[in-house]
């Protein structure tokens, strides 16, 4: 997927009749963004294709990822490091005096180092503190949230972000358990959930959906994605590309719907007597949907659920709402909340 993602940003004929391969000898100029630096795998591949005057703005919420990014930037002046969510893209571009970008890639979700480190609290397979924050320097942990949230709030988060049928039973068990003993560790939560989720999905731990839901909530992942999608439409230069890799259906749905709406803004008017010239113009051109190849899945089984979607900004201006209506906020819990890591309200959409 890394190779295909970088090809998507650098190959002029990417997506033409399903074409996804690349020519690493092509050198590209411009301003690019890696919104999810991780350990820099995608960034390194992209930097290999960028000219010496190009810029690569890299974001991550995770302090350990940022350490790696800072280290890389010391020997490569093309890299600009931002320790913040990619939802802050507009503010960062403004601060840097950058008017438009030529490409952006997002590889959503958590990284393998985050999942594999028990101390981060993302995995029900490893016993550790119930933290789950990508940015460990801000916001409340999963344990802190579960200790004070109402039963309704917990149920809603687990139902919406985990699409979990047993959300009410799980929320009830959490609230009843915390009356005697707080939930402090990942195994505390995994065992409690396993005791109330009666059916097992094939190959899945009963706590999979609950962990996913709480992680999405703690990191405000969908709110941040929604902010980023509108920001991307506004900042991509004509011909600039966006390449987004999603790992679960909620984020993929949001990306797919945004791209489809921006590529066919007149779809809902198709049956109305509107002249062609008065139809809203597409601001994105779709360049395809890609899945990991068998070999990559063998090397990294987590790649099985990954979906890459690519689109290109057209020359047409955004509608009067600046593209806000292309991003559907459906399914978000408590749209009025402030981000756990401060500053931005979802209402800013
Ligand atoms: C799947 S990993 C990316 C791996 C990366 N492509 C690489 O090659 O190493 C996702 C990374 O994005 C970060 N992340 C997730 N959501 C974020 C957000 N909204 N803003 C900034 N970073 C985010 C996570 O902390 C994690 O390090």
Image (cartoon, helix red, strand yellow):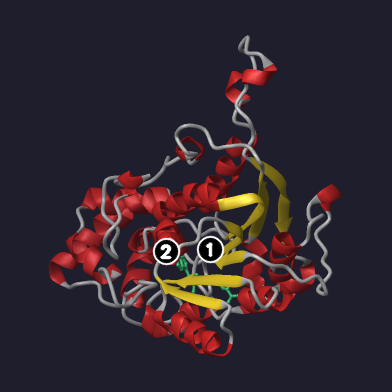
Q: Residue tagged by mark 1?
A: 108
Q: Earlier in the sequence, mark 1 or mark 2?
A: 2
Q: In this picture, is 183 found above or below 89?
A: below
Which quadrant would residue 63 be assigned to in this image? bottom left
Most distant residue in the left direction: 179
Callout 2: SS:
helix
Q: Position of residue 281 (x, y in %)?
A: 63, 30
Which quadrant would residue 211 be assigned to in this image? bottom left
Closer-to-camera residue (120/286): 286
| Quadrant that contains the C terminus | top left
* Of labels 1 and 2, the one closer to you: 2
Q: In this picture, is 160 found above or below 9?
A: above
Give the class, few, some or many, for how many residues have Cα within 10 Å of label 2's Cα (few <14, many ≥20).
some
Left or right of 110? Residue 119 is left
Q: Residue tagged by mark 2?
A: 92
Give the class, few, some or many, for how many residues have Cα within 10 Å of label 1's Cα (few <14, many ≥20).
some
Q: Position of residue 21 (x, y in %)?
A: 83, 64
**Mark 1 C-beta closer than 8 Å to ligand 1:** yes
Q: Position of residue 39 (x, y in %)?
A: 55, 81
**Mark 2 C-beta closer than 8 Å to ligand 1:** no
Residue at 73% in and 70% down: 3
Callout 1: SS:
loop
Q: How many marks?
A: 2
Residue at 48% in and 85% down: 70
Left or right of 164? Residue 249 is right
Residue at 37% in and 77% down: 121
Left or right of 172? Residue 306 is right
Between the residue at mark 1 and the residue at mark 2, the CA separation in whole angstroms equals: 19 Å
Closer-to-camera residue (16/135): 16
Residue at 14% in and 65% down: 179
Which quadrant would residue 104 be assigned to in this image? bottom right
Q: Position of residue 311 (x, y in %)?
A: 67, 49
């Amino acid at each position: 997927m890394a190779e295909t993602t970088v090809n998507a940003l650098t190959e002029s004929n990417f997506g033409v009749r399903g074409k996804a391969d690349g020519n690493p000898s092509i050198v590209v100029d411009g301003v690019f963004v890696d919104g999810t630096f991780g350990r820099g795998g995608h960034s390194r591949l992209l930097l290999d294709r960028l000219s010496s005057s190009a810029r690569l703005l890299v974001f991550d919420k995770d302090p350990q990822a940022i350490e790696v990014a800072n280290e890389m930037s010391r020997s490569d002046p093309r890299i600009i490091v931002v320790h913040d969510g990619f939802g802050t893209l507009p503010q960062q571009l403004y601060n840097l005096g950058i008017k438009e970008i030529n490409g952006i890639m997002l590889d959503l979700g958590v990284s393998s180092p985050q999942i594999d480190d028990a101390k981060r609290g993302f995995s029900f397979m490893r016993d550790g503190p119930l933290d789950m924050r990508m940015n460990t320097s801000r916001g409340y942990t999963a344990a802190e949230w579960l200790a004070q949230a109402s039963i309704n709030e917990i149920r809603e988060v687990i139902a919406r972000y985990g699409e979990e049928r047993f959300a009410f039973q799980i929320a009830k068990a959490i609230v009843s358990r915390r009356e005697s003993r707080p939930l402090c560790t990942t195994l505390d939560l995994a065992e409690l959930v396993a005791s109330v989720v009666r059916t097992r999905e094939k190959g899945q731990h009963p706590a999979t959906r609950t962990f996913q839901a709480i992680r999405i909530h703690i990191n405000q992942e969908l709110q941040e994605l929604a902010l980023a999608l509108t920001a991307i439409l506004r900042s991509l230069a004509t011909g600039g590309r966006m390449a987004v890799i999603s790992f679960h259906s909620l984020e993929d749905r949001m990306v797919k719907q945004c791209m489809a709406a921006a590529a066919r803004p007149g779809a809902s008017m198709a049956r109305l007597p509107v002249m062609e010239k008065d139809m809203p113009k597409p601001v994105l051109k779709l360049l395809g949907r890609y899945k990991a190849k068998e070999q990559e899945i063998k090397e990294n089984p987590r790649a099985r659920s990954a979906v890459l979607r690519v689109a290109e900004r057209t020359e047409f201006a955004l509608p009067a709402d600046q593209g806000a209506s292309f991003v559907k906020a459906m399914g978000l819990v408590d749209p009025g909340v402030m981000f756990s890591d401060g500053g931005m309200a979802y209402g800013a959409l």
